[in-house]
């Protein structure tokens, strides 16, 4: 007989509600209960597929009309996860105006790369510092101003000051672009995300999110005013020239959205919140430094690179996968273990994690 398969408990994943796309089953193609009245755009490669790119034909029987969402907003689905950031900013080149992006210092690499590719002037404001951002906006004479931020920051788990950011955007006639990758499906009513949790609505607001984390499938979407969506359809090259997603992906996404917005999704989020609170208490009891996060991303700052790697290795040998995050992903001296919780985890799993951390703490004394 062969050797038994050794299973490793994954506490470093991204699928926070515990979905893996496997529950697709007999999906309803249209799903309007999420993100206001979430609908599939007529120029949407996720639901288009008779060859070529985003402008291809429809998949049998799907309504090709553009649906309304929240406050005259529309949804553009099908951008390939992080390419949505690149598409939005590449379109800025066409404006021939003086464009300035105001980017949070801890934004995800995809937002940083998108800002660079836009060739706009980029100003970095200190993480979450709305006073500094306000001063920068006051001093700017740009024709087009965009404030760009994650909602939930992927390496710290904290939530941006969303209401204050929107207030600044409206005061300065700026756009606010929010990446809700780690909020969608997990936070807010029916899992609509951090933006819905903060009850934000504005024509100045552009929300981007992924279907590859909480939804457990692939693809991404942009939610914005109808004019913005039409502009992206016409000018965002990564959207226009990408290959259409498959019909199977469309059905899988539809089924996943139904779960997220329904009773099962709420039950998963309730369980996840209990895991988060327990993990917060657990990490505070260690000799290391936890980040004050109330989301599924629970970092534990170890400090030195080698120490973080040694701990990750010790936990791995104990059957626990907790990745060590080091510079340049995080600042020097803040190497950390990144615990990423999922509703698929159990309290027994946290018992194992707690025992592993205690063993590591004992080895450092």
Image (cartoon, rainbow, N blue to C red):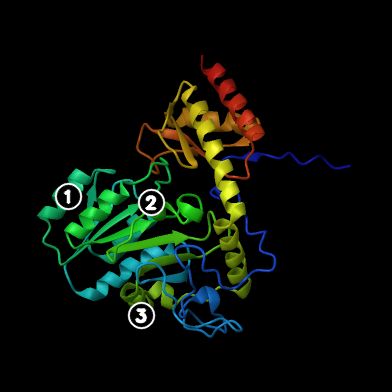
Image location of residue 271, percent across then percent down? 58, 41
Point 58% across, 57% down: residue:
262
Please identify, in this view, whether the residue under mark 2 or under mark 1 is nearer the observer: 1
x then y, percent, for residue 258: 59, 62
Residue 251, placed above or below residue 169: below
Image-quadrant location for residue 335:
top left
Q: Nearer the viewer, mark 2 or mark 3?
A: 3
Location of residue 265 with respect to 43 vertically, above or below: above
Given residues 99 and 325, the one toward you in this image is: 99
- Residue 234's tag is 3
Helix, strand or loop at label 3? It is helix
Q: Say which of 333 and 354 sits in front.
A: 354
Establish if 172 lies above or below 250.
Answer: above
- Residue 167 placement (x, y as % from top left): 23, 54
The residue indicated by pointer 1 is 134
The reply to whether discs 2 and 1 touch (Cβ–Cβ < 8 Å) is no
């Amino acid at each position: 007989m062969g050797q038994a398969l050794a299973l490793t408990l994954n506490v470093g994943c991204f699928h926070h509600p515990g979905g893996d796309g496997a529950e697709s089953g007999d999906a309803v193609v249209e799903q309007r209960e999420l993100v206001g009245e979430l609908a599939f755009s007529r120029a949407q490669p996720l639901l288009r597929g008779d060859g070529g790119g985003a402008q291809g034909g429809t998949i049998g029987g799907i309504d090709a009309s553009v649906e309304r969402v929240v406050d005259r907003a529309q949804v553009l689905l099908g951008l390939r996860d992080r390419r949505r950031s690149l598409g939005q900013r590449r379109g800025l080149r066409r404006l021939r105006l003086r464009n300035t992006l105001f980017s949070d210092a801890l934004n995800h690499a995809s937002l940083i790369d998108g800002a660079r590719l836009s060739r706009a002037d980029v100003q970095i404001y200190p993480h979450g510092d709305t006073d500094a951002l306000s001063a920068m906006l006051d001093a700017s004479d740009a024709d087009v101003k965009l404030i760009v931020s994650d909602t939930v920051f992927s390496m710290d788990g904290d939530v941006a000051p969303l209401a204050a950011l929107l207030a600044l955007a409206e005061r300065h006639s700026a756009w606010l672009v929010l990446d809700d990758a780690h909020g969608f499906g997990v936070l807010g009513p029916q899992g609509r995300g951090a933006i819905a949790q903060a009850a934000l609505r504005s024509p100045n607001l552009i929300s981007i999110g992924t279907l590859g984390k909480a939804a457990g499938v692939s693809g991404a979407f942009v939610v914005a005013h109808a004019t913005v969506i039409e502009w992206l359809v016409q000018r965002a090259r990564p959207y226009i020239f990408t290959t259409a997603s498959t019909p199977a992906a469309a059905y899988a996404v539809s089924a996943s959205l139904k779960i997220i917005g329904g009773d099962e999704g709420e039950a998963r989020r309730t369980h996840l919140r209990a895991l988060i609170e327990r993990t917060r208490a657990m990490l505070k009891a260690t000799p290391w430094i936890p980040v004050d996060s109330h989301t599924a991303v629970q970092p534990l700052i170890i400090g030195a690179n080698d120490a973080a790697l040694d701990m990750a290795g010790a936990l791995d040998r104990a059957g626990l996968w907790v990745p060590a995050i080091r510079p340049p992903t995080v600042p020097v001296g803040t190497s950390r273990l990144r615990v990423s919780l999922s509703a698929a985890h159990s309290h027994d799993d946290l018992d194992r994690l707690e025992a592993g951390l205690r063993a590591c703490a004992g080895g450092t004394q």
